[in-house]
Image (cartoon, helix red, strand yellow):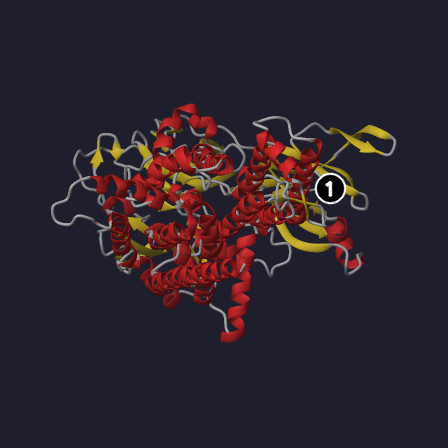
Amino acid sequence: MGSVAMDNNESWKSDLRHLGLLMGLCLLIGIYLIWQTVLISPDGVFYITQAQEFALPSSGVAQRCPAGYPFVLWLAHRAATLFTGHDSAMLWIHSSQSVTLLLRVLAVVPLYFLGRLFVGPGNSFWALLLLIVLPYPARYGSDVLREWPYLLFLGLGFWLLCWGLRHRQWWVLALVGLDAGLGYTIRPECAQLVIYAFLGLACLGAEGILPLYSGRDRIKISQSEAKMASRRKGGTPSPRNRRTLWGAGAMLTAGLLVPVVPYVWATGSVMPHQLRPATFNAPPVISAIGPNAASSNPLEFEVAEGDLLELPIKAADPHGDPLRFSLVGIPTDSRPIYEFRSRSIGDCIWTVSEDEKDQVLATYSREVWEYAGLAGYAYVQSDARPGLLLVRRFWLPPQQRHLYTTDEAEVRTIVEKSPPDSWSHEGVAYYAFGPDDHPSDTVPVYRFGSREEGCSWVVGADRGKKVRTSEGEKEKTGTVVWYVHLGGEPPAGAVIESGVLRWRPGPGQKGDYQVNIIVSDGELECCQLMKIRVTPRRMKDRGQKTEDGGQRTNDGIRPFSVLRPPSAGFSGLRAQQAGVAELPKATVQVFTAVAKDLMIVLAVPWVLGLYYRFRYQAERVERTLMAAVVIVNLALMLGRHIALEAGGDRRYSLGLIALTIFYVPTGMEVMARWLAQWKWPALPRWPWFHLLVAVGIVVCLPKVLIPTRGARTGYRAAAAWLQQNTKADDVVAVPDSRISFYAQRQGLFYRQHPNSRRADYVVMTGHGSEMEAPQEWHREYATTVDRRNREALVIYSTSRAKR
């Protein structure tokens, strides 16, 4: 007994030495990488932004992403503010990087004991040493990414599962379920632990293995029972075994439900956030029409009769949805009326403000206010046309409904006789024509109901409307309250083809025209008004230069620039577009990502070790669980690549690599034995295994230690300029969210074209002609993005910044 206790004591001392070395090295490399960090990843900015919203009521963070990791970042930041006493973007960054590194260091512990369980302490040490120096996994642990926090729960749960199955300690499965549920709040893939647990139980059940201990009294079963159980080769488990396995499964499920049930209650869905129906859809963005930036006011152009007006439309959808273009003719000085409907209360919002439309879309879900399209066209100035009346908008908070009226007597009644907590005046919605004096090209707006009971409105419909009452559905007659325009036909010959507006006015089309360019993603719309003046036909002078540097040809003025038409892109799930045809390419890319994370040189011993261990050394439970780990993680990577989005495969291979890294030393041992069989004249016995480990470390370390301060330095320089030269409330349109985050300015992210109507400054990156800006923008600052290439970064101020 004394020798056994001494051996156990020495074993624990060896484990502590191994863990001390591994965790110390992991911490040193992580601190060095944090010091070398120029920019955190774009996903890191996203997670910090979600963490910043935890203190806000009804932030809805859990609806946008698993809330576990942002919550950890929020806690780390709160702890950091206790020592610093101030807040800043850099404090968020450093506290988030530090807690992520801490969780990476802690993840080494369960991974080490998992490897010790399968391949022994020596190989587990070498495997974890190689994992720590792998460049890409090391960088994930020093960035603001959830890979290592997720891996901490995945590795801990998998080790508990394997230990519990090996020692027949079924209560441990409750901890495995609890761990899987907590990990699910960080990344839903952590639920794969449940699959492994049931596979392990099924494997033991198929072998007919009895528990070593029974009940709380831990009474050992008899040797005869154990022998009978061991002789069962795939037979049916005994009733006692069956009850034991069912009880273990119940404990696993109970442990899982403890954190998952509150999480599902908070989010309203058990589905991963990537597969949930989108609750928010951003509208398309029109950035420019020809040489002019998009504006809330109509853009003005001039063309002569017979000349070709050709204006490329810069437009894109933030979600990559395909765009549809339409062109309507509208009265001069009129504006589109955007309509929102509430299904729950039957109310509507009418607004002619593009900013208010975007604010409603960004603030409320579709269940609260659903976009209903363009209700018509009205005016924003009282003197735009004779006979215009003010359409005032009121809001009643207790009943959550609006009132629109042109009746000044009703307005006085509301203002003078309503209690203070009743109707509030929200201003003028727009100007419209009265019922007694309206042009022939207008349509009526009907009002149903009363101010006391609630009103509803219908534009251009029949006077009758079916409404529900306490007595059932009845026909009600609406009252005409005002008139508005509807969109008409565009000028003859004006069309939009492949994202380009083309119009060659013919003889007799001289005059002023106003049109509305509507860009739709099938659900939401964005509009840009244009005023086009057609002048009398003029003589054409081939080859004559124009004032703006264009070239006059027989067809008129050549367009400002040849711009690519908007691409269709992908919307939501990509599986419908990609289909089975993506599978071969996705498979190659997934395996390539795994090999690159293993720095290629470790991929060979990894595959060899997996094969050799499965073929000759592993027990049935180990083969089953590890085969499931490989299959499940590769399937998750393939599914994500095909169904959700391509890219990021390296990060998503970390779980597979970390749980199977222990087979790399096994593969190296096999390779060492092969090399030892050869005759080497220099030395009779080379330490081949340690040489192979050294080769792996030597290949990895330079990639880890090479300074990365030259990468994306232009982003930090642009952020510094914005912070020093712009106002705190300025809005900056950026192609990368990190620029506005480091600058501590409100960012307006864009993928293809910026929304210049809402931005005071626009940051553009590219080469040469890719960065052509509208003529109203003013160049403020320029630098290079990266020291290693010639990509330029330019900051422009828009016309909005000069207001």
Residue 26 visible, this orientation? yes
Figure quadrant of the C terminus: bottom left
Seen as rendered, the residue at the extreme right is: 471
Residue at 36% from the left image edge and 64% from the top image edge: 28
Q: How many marks?
A: 1
Looking at the image, residue 386 lies above or below residue 3:
above
Q: Is residue 457 left or right of residue 723?
A: right
Residue 722 at x, y percent in the picture? 37, 63
Figure quadrant of the N terminus: bottom right
Q: Is residue 799 left or right of residue 113?
A: left
Give the quarter of the image for residue 439: top right
Q: In this view, does 612 lie to the left or right of 515?
A: left
Looking at the image, residue 331 lies above or below residue 682:
above
Residue 732 at x, y percent in the picture? 42, 56
Q: Which element is circle 1 on?
A: loop
| Camera-side residue of 758 and 716 | 716
| Camera-side residue of 374 and 278 | 278
Looking at the image, residue 773 lies above or below residue 329:
below
Q: Which amino acid does label 1 sit on?
A: Ile
Residue 791 at x, y percent in the picture? 25, 50
Seen as rendered, the residue at the extreme top is: 580
Mark 1: few/some/many CA within 10 Å (<14, 14-19, 20+): few
Residue 384 visible, this orientation? no
Residue 292 at x, y percent in the picture? 35, 45
- Pointer 1 residue: 345
| Camera-side residue of 742 and 66 | 66
Residue at 79% from the left image edge and 56% from the top image edge: 418
| Camera-side residue of 696 and 364 | 696
